[in-house]
Image (spheres, rainbow, N blue to C red):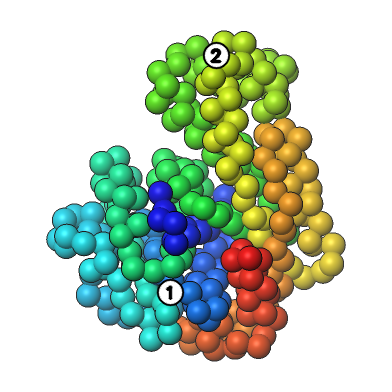
Amino acid sequence: MTTDNQKIIAVFGPKGGVGKSTITANLAIAIAEMGKKVIAVDLDLGASNLHAIFGVRDTRHSLEDFTMKKVKELSDCVTDTNIDNLGIICGGDVPGIANMPYQQKVKLINNLSTLDCDVIVLDLAAGVSNNVIDFLFIADTSLLVTTPEITSLLNVYSFIKTSVFRRLNFHFKALKSIELLELLEKAKDSIENPSLATMNGFLEAAAIIDQRASESAKKVLTKFKPYIVINRIKTPNDANVGTVITDLMQRYINILTSVIITIHEDQCVGKALSMLKPVMIAKPSCAFSLDVKEAAYKIMD
């Protein structure tokens, strides 16, 4: 969906409270400091808080105004952050906006490419919803943010699997393949259908039904290679969670990702939030800021 000179980065996660929006804001700053013109877009619709992290109190227009046709151009919703090369589009808090109608969503997706910037960073809502899936799969790069607790393992794996299944559901619906939709439904129950427990098993079964559709589905999945961001690292062992997640993703759902980004626990984050300033601005040399800068270079490399 992007132009040749524009990159979309989507930041997402299986649950709230993992620091997703904080990472989105500071990653946008780190990329802007690299000389790229950046716009951060708050797509956590109905529960937006990106503006608060930037310390932006007043916005002339928000994403809500664009979806409600109060403004014509998405660019009219860009708010200055007083940070060089960086603007934001705030989400809005109108009830129901989180369940954006499909046509509104298509209009928004099409208009992202009209924004005058090099990089668009999307802060997606937590969890799996149609909004999240639609915006996630238009991104050139995606970052899955989680924390190192062992309970996060199943959350992340389940989240990615559900995301992939929803994307394939959309794909097969577009192809009007009832048989493949039925096969996908069977694959959700791996106990009853062990041969469909892995994505390779599913794609092999799909190829018997429709070789061309199976190959196109494989191409859809090949494009999805999220970076795994382990936030709030406290010990060296915490980073191992990332390896376990990537192994599960590769073994069962054929999602290949070799890049694990670690962000260390840092008291500066809470202090910066209480000051209504991004960490990269309030404490540019702290561990969190240095980790985010390193992440930005990996992503933009």
Helix, strand or loop at label 1? It is loop
Q: Is residue 248 above or below residue 258?
A: above
Q: Position of residue 98 (x, y in %)?
A: 34, 50
Query: Which of the pair 255/282 is nearer the observer?
Result: 255
Please give the residue where the numbered disc 1 appears in the rendered image.
37
Q: Is residue 88 above or below residue 196?
A: below
Q: Position of residue 83 (x, y in %)?
A: 43, 84
Image marks 1 and 2: residues in contact by CB distance under 8 Å? no
* Residue depicted at x 68% and y 15%: 192
Amino acid type, label 2 = Asp
Q: Position of residue 211 (x, y in %)?
A: 58, 16
Helix, strand or loop at label 2? It is loop
Q: In which quadrant of the rendered view does residue 216 lie?
A: top right
Compare marks 1 and 2 and give the one earlier in the sequence: 1
Query: Which of the pair 272/74 is nearer the observer?
Result: 74
Q: Is residue 269 above or below residue 234?
A: below
- How far separated are the C-alphas under marks 1 and 2? 44 Å
Q: In which quadrant of the rendered view does residue 286 lie?
A: bottom right
- The answer to whether residue 247 is left or right of residue 71 is right
Q: Position of residue 64 (x, y in %)?
A: 25, 59
Query: Which of the pair 94/166 is nearer the observer?
Result: 166
Amino acid type, label 1 = Lys
Locate the C terminus and report the quarter of the image it occupies: bottom right
* Residue depicted at x 50% and y 35%: 167
Please give the residue where the numbered disc 2 appears in the rendered image.
210
Identify the residue at the far front of this view: 4
Mark 2 Cα within 10 Å, few/some/many (few <14, many 20+)?
A: some
